[in-house]
Image (tube, rainbow, N blue to C red):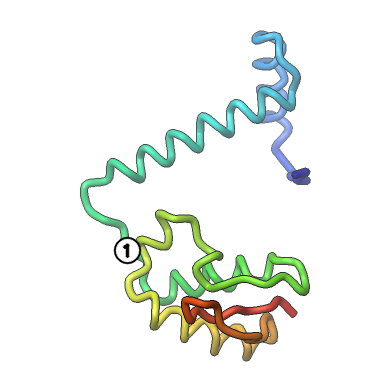
Amino acid sequence: MQVLVSLPDALVIAMMDCARANGRSLDDQILESLSEATTAARAALASTSQPVTLNLEETLTLALTRAAARAQGDRFEFAHLFLSPEWSAVANTRAAGRSFRKRAEKLGLVSLIGRSVSRHAIYQRR
């Protein structure tokens, strides 16, 4: 997947210096740095002593943002908008799903097009 991202000049220069020092291409250096940061973030999330909980507003904000970022015509379930640790942190998935449907349809982001075999709502991005 290709992603276009704007980065501060100082960060790109530092990444280029690291890539040169390690004998890597800039792309490989960026991938390695992102991989290390992701691994560290996951470890930190897993090691928190208290479970993290997303309240309804946090859940809806995250879900609506991610639904808006999907391509028109894309089909998905509410749970597909979250990473596994995030989904585990949603306080009440049923209430969050119902609230998502109301807000997303009101905003014109999605249409409910059916239900899965497990009776989860299937949405299509408008």
Expressed as whole percent of the image width and height from the top left, the position of residue 32 reads: 60, 26
Q: Secondary structure at mark 1?
A: loop
Expressed as whole percent of the image width and height from the top left, the position of residue 13 reads: 72, 23
Relative to 1, 120 lies left or right: left
Quadrant placement of the C terminus: bottom right
Expressed as whole percent of the image width and height from the top left, the position of residue 114 reads: 61, 85
Q: Quadrant of residue 8?
A: top right
Q: Quadrant of residue 33?
A: top right
Q: Amino acid at mark 1?
A: Thr
Task: Please state which of residues 67 and 6 is positioned toward the viewer in this rendering.
Answer: 67
Q: Is residue 27 above or below residue 87?
A: above
Q: Which residue is mark 1?
A: 53
Task: Identify the residue at horizontal 55%, vertical 65% (top origin).
Answer: 81
Task: Please state which of residues 36 and 83 is positioned toward the viewer in this rendering.
Answer: 83
Graded by Cα atoms within 10 Å as few (under 14), some (14 to 19) or many (20 or more), the crowding at tag 1 reads some
Quadrant placement of the N terminus: top right
Expressed as whole percent of the image width and height from the top left, the position of residue 100 reads: 52, 81
